Amino acid sequence: MTITAPPPIPKAAGSLPLLGHATPLMRDNLAFIASLRSYGPLVEIRIPKPMIVVNDPELIRTMLVDLGPTLDKGRFFEKMGQLLGDSVVTAAGSEHVRKRRQLQPAFRHVEITRYVDLMREQVTATTAGWKPGEVLDVREVMVKLSLDMLAATVFSSSIDKEAFDQLRRDLSVVMNGVGTRIMLPDWAERLPLPANRRFTAARDAVRATIGNAVDKLRDSGRDTGDMLSLLLNAEDEETGETLTGHQICSEILTLAVAGTETTASVLSWVLYELARNPAVGEKVHAELDGVLGDRPVTFEDLTRLPYLGRVITEALRLHHTGWLVTRRTLDRTRIGEWEIPAGTELAYCQHALHRDPELFPDPLKFDPDRWLDENQARLAEGAFLPFGAGKHKCIGDRFAQSELTTAIATIVRDWRLELTPGQTVRPVARATVRPSTLLMTASPRVAAA
């Protein structure tokens, strides 16, 4: 019996000595990553070291779920850990499992129930400042809102307004700098450049602010009922030890950078699509009017808004914020037909995966009804991964879904946002895939009688 060797893994065109594929990545990283799907299930790129990009949904699922326990999280998460500190997001293997179990109580159903009220209050406070006819820079507004919701749920009364305002400014610098630094070689961030100095100063200031809040709360002995109190009391199930102040800083800093940036981008894209698709917007309004009437949204309402849920799901498909997620083989590993050497960097792109026409017919069309039960049945396994999969699936997935639904329901029930003419809105990938520009005009909405 003759065993046929698999074809060699193709190498993407355009690699340069020393730079690898840095040039096309810097020029238009989304277009470059999307083009890799034409090479087949696997393709090698260099950034500047070799990396295998997995394109096939079944193999992506194999990598995340079946091989998950045997893989490290890879270069990007490793780099994020270097920049922000070790956390449940950046940890791998048994360390990740231990951290995840220790932090899980902060994301329990009962806690999220209470978080919804805090989130809604921040959204209401944000929209209260809008004026009819005002042109909003929607992404900037959503970043601020996401930070406000983070502060409400994480810190509650553990941090004063002055400290929070400074925290927001510093976090903005950190969020804008992380995506670039993850892509660059380590030596680049050590150069004495103004951007590097600003990033380091802002990151250190964020850690100091969070550290002060941790120390004050620990010294007071109070339980403020916020996520910070839960983290202070979280115990390691094996040792019984609690988190140190440094560990709490790292967890919150990573949560702030990863969660805030992602939430702001998704909220922006949902509002953009509602404005582009008036019929979808009208259905959302009808559902909100029927379920909520004049009262504010509560946790119990979130499952009673199925159409809005499908709108958010479709935004997570068409405008997924993740554009390169990494893993690393620890041992020689088989993926499909191919044997991958130990120490190989692997990656996949949710943004490109979710726009593959072979998986999603008419992929650039915003169609919430893709997610009706009868249509989902035809979806290939591993084709839709809004929060990843396997043991490293996002720990805050339910938190994020609740946050997105609460924010959109609260905003669009009372306001209409229309696209300002003359702008070209396109996706750009930094730390997340965000709108290049998104100016929208706000006008109060009168609910149907």
Image (cartoon, helix red, strand yellow):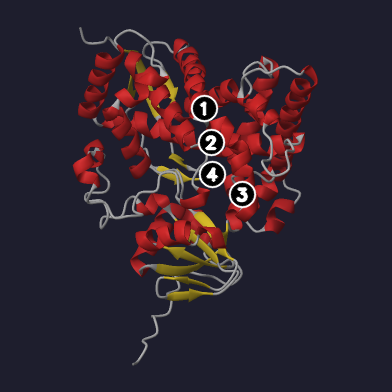
Q: Secondary structure at mark 4?
A: loop
Label 4 belongs to which residue? 431
Seen from the viewer's position, the closer of residues 360 and 156 is 156
| Label 2–label 1 contact, CB within 8 A | yes
Q: Is residue 1 left or right of residue 104?
A: left
Q: Between disc 2 and disc 3, whose residue precedes?
A: 3
**Marks 4/1: CA distance?**
15 Å
Label 1 belongs to which residue? 146
Mark carried by residue 259: 2
- Tell me which residue sits at (24%, 15%) in the image: 290
Q: Which circle, 2 or 3, is nearer the viewer? A: 3
| Label 4–label 1 contact, CB within 8 A | no
**Marks 1/3: CA distance?**
26 Å
- Relative to residue 242, is residue 138 depicted above or below? above
Q: Amino acid at mark 3?
A: His
Q: Secondary structure at mark 1?
A: helix
Mark carried by residue 420: none
- Percent position (x, y) of residue 2? 35, 92
- Tell me which residue sits at (31%, 39%) in the image: 314
Q: Which circle, 1 or 3, is nearer the viewer? A: 3
- Relative to residue 209, is residue 82 depicted above or below? below
| Label 2–label 3 contact, CB within 8 A | no
